[in-house]
Image: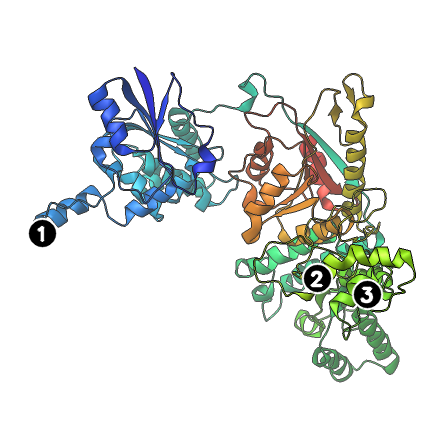
Amino acid sequence: RIPLIFHHRSSKRDSDHEECMDSKFCYHTSSISDAIQRCEYDETHFAAVFIDHEPSLKLPHDFIAQFYIVLTTVQRLSNSWRNGSSEDEKTLYRSARTSDSCISPLLKVNWLRLIVDEGHTMGKGSHGNAVQCASWICAQRRWAMTGTPTPQTNRQSDVRNILGLLQFLQHDFLSSEKIWKNAISKSWNEQSFEGYFRLCHLLSLLMRRHTKDSIRGLPPPRFSVTYTELSPGETLAYNTLTETIRSNIVITSLEAKTSGWEDSLLNPKHSSHADKALQNVRLSCCGGRDLIPSLTQKSYRETLEILEKNHHASDMKLQIVKKFLDCARNGGKSSCSFCGIQLQVLLLLPCTHLICSECIDTVDTMCPVCKKKFDPDEFQLLQPGFDVIWEWNLSNDSNTSRSHARQSVAPNPNESPVNYAVSQHGTNYHQRDESDPSQQQDVIGLEPLVASLNRRLKKGEPHSCRFPNAFTNGKCYLCYEEHNFCDLVNEKKECCTCHRKAEECPEEDTKASYIIRQLLQLIDHRKNRSSYPSRSSAPVLGESITAHEKRDLKVIIFSQFRKILDVVGDRLIRRLGNGVVAEHWGSCRDKELKKFKSSPSCICMLLSKDGSHGLDLSYVTNIIFLDEIYDKSLKHQVVSRAWRMGAEHSVQVEQLVAKKQYRRSHASNESN
C-alpha cells in the first residue's frame, strides 16, 4: 500500500509546495474527500502523515485519527483553546441539550504520543493558551523536546520552570505545587544539598539528553577569544561609568542617620537602573566614547551654598570646586587629591578635597588627605549628583563626510527635476548647442528620461529606479525611494547604483573597526581561495579554506544589548553598505533574514536575543560575540543556530573581550 500524505494547499502557499511531487512511494493530496476515498474505498493507500498548515481549517476528528503522524502548529492550539476542553463541552451538552461540537478535533482522539518542539515553553504553566490546550490533549506518552529546559540562573522562578514541565508531563507525584514546595523548592532556597540531589534524581528518571557530539558527520564548532585594546575615548567612558557606579555604592553604604539604601543600585527596587548601568558599561567597550556628566544649575548652586554656609569654605577652595564642576560638565577630567588619578567624576568631601571611590575611607569616615573626619549625612548631602549622558557623534560624522559630495551636485529647489537630472550628464536639455554633434547625441539618449520625469508616477506603478551620477541623497528620481541595497565592498568604495561613498570607521571604535577589517580580509580570502590547492588554515578568524568549498561567507554578529548592535551596526553599514549588512529585529526581521540567506553579497547579520531561538542558520560560517554572555544557555542557543544537523562545515565562534577591564579576567577564569 502507498503511504498518503495530506498536505493542505491554499492559493497563497502553492509556490511553497511545488517540490511535493507524487510518486510510487507516496501520494500527496489536499482534498479531504480524496483522502477518504483512497484510504477507505480504494484501499490502495493508507493514511501516513497529516500536515496542518491551515489552523482555521475545520477537520473531522475521525479523519485525522486515521493518520499515523499529525503535524500541527501552535496557532491551532491557540485557536482551539477558545472552544474549551472536553469537560467544558460535556457541561454545555448537559445544560443546553445540543449535539453541536465545537471543541478541537485533537481533543477527541486518544493519541499514543504527544511530542512538543521547543518544549521549554510548556514550563510556563497553564497561563498560556497553547500550553493549556496542550495539557488537555489525551496522550499515553508525552515528550517535551528542548535544548534548554530552564534558564541557567539561580533564581527560584527559573527552577519553577521545571515544575511547569512536570505539570505538562502529568507527573504522578511532583506535579502538585504543594509537594514540589516541600520536597524541592524549600530546600533549594535554603541552598541545601537535599533539594539538589532530589532534583538531580528526578531529572535522571525523566530526562534523556542527546548532544550533538554523538552525531556522526557533524563537525564541531571552533572557539577562540580575541582581546581588543580600548581606545582612549572608550577607556575614559569606561572609567567614568565605573566610578559613577562605585560612588553610588560607597555613598549609600555608609552608616548614617538617614539610610541611603533607598537610592542604592544594589536595592532590588532599582534593578532596572542597575541593568541600564551594566548596559552602559558594556557599551563603553563597544564603541561608546563620548560620555558627558550633566549637572543641573540648581544642583550646581546648592553644592556651592552648602560648602560656603555649612562648612565655611574659603573663596580659594570654592574656586577649586567650581573648576571641578565646570570641567566635568564640559567633559574634562580632574585629579584625585590622594592618588592623582584623573577622572571625570569624583567624590566631594566637606573639606573640599576631591577623592576617588577607591581612596575613600568608609570605615573611619576620614579624609585620606587632611585626616579630618566627616559626617556621613553631610557627605551624602554634599554630592552634586551627576547624571552621565552619551553624546553620539555619528550624525556629525555623516554630515561632514557627505558635505563635499553635495556641494557640486546639490539640486536647486527652484529647478525642475528634468533639468537637474539632465545636468548630471553634463548637458542642459533646454540650453544645448544644436551645432555640437556630441551634445545632440547626448540629448537623444536622454529623451526617454526626460519624458519619464515629466510624467508623475502613480503609487505602486512598476518602473526602473534611476539615480544621479554623483551621490546626493540616494533617492530615485521617479519614486523618491532611497536605495537600500548599497554594496560598498569594491575598489572604488562606492555603490555602483546610487554612488554612495563608503565611510571609514574610526580606530577609536575598537571592536567595530576590528570586525570591519576581519570581514574585508575574509572577503579577500574568499575571492582568492582558488590559490589554495589543498586544505590550509587561513590567518583570519581561524577559517579553513578548501579549493572545492563553494559556500558563501555568512557571519553572525551577536549581542544581548540592542544599543550595542545599533552602534556597531551603524559603523558596519556606513563602511560596507546596507546591502551587505542585515538587521534581524523589528517588523522587517523576516525580510532581512531572507536577504541574508539568499543574497550572496549580504555577508553579515546583526542578531539579538530575539533571534537566539528557533532559527536555522546552518549555512553560517562565522559567529562573533560582541560581549561576554553570562547565561551560558543563551550562548549555547546562539551557537546551536549554526551548529545543527545539516551543517556540512565547521563554524568559527569568536568571543571579543576588551582589555583593561573585568571581563578579561572572567574569560580567563572560564578558559582555565
Vertical relation: 247 (above or below) 599:
below
Instruction: Pick the residue in front: 108 or 322.
Output: 108
User: What residue would you read off at disc 3?
Assistant: 429
> What is the basis of the colouring in this image?
rainbow
How far from the left and from the top, in percent, is residue 31?
30, 33
Q: How far is disc 3 from disc 1 in space, using C-alphas?
A: 84 Å
What residue sits right under mark 2 in the picture?
451
Callout 3, which amino acid? Tyr
- Frontmost of labels 3 and 1 is 3
Q: Quarter holding the N terminus?
A: top left
Residue 21 location in percent, x, y? Answer: 43, 25
Q: Which residue is mark 1?
A: 95
Query: Is 606 left or right of 409, judged from the image as shown?
Result: left
Three-letter code, disc 2: Ala
Name the image quarter holding residue 272.
bottom right
Kindly report the distance in space between the C-alpha atoms of the residues bearing marks 1 and 2: 74 Å
Occupied quadrant, residue 385: bottom right
Disc nearer the start of the sequence (3/1):
1
Q: Is residue 432 visible?
A: yes
Q: Nearer the viewer, residue 45 or 381?
A: 45
Q: Element type at marker 3? A: loop
**Upstream in sequence: badge 2 or badge 3:** 3
Q: Nearer the viewer, residue 257 or 660?
A: 660
The local secondary structure at tag 2 comes to helix
Q: Residue furthest bottom?
A: 309
Mark 3: give few (<14), some (14-19) or many (20+) Cα within 10 Å.
many
Pick the residue in front: 77 or 580.
Answer: 580
Between the C-alphas of marks 2 and 3, the distance is: 12 Å
SS for tag 1?
helix
Percent across and percent down for residue 300 are: 74, 78
Rendered-image quadrant of the C terminus: top right
From this viewpoint, is residue 240 visible? no
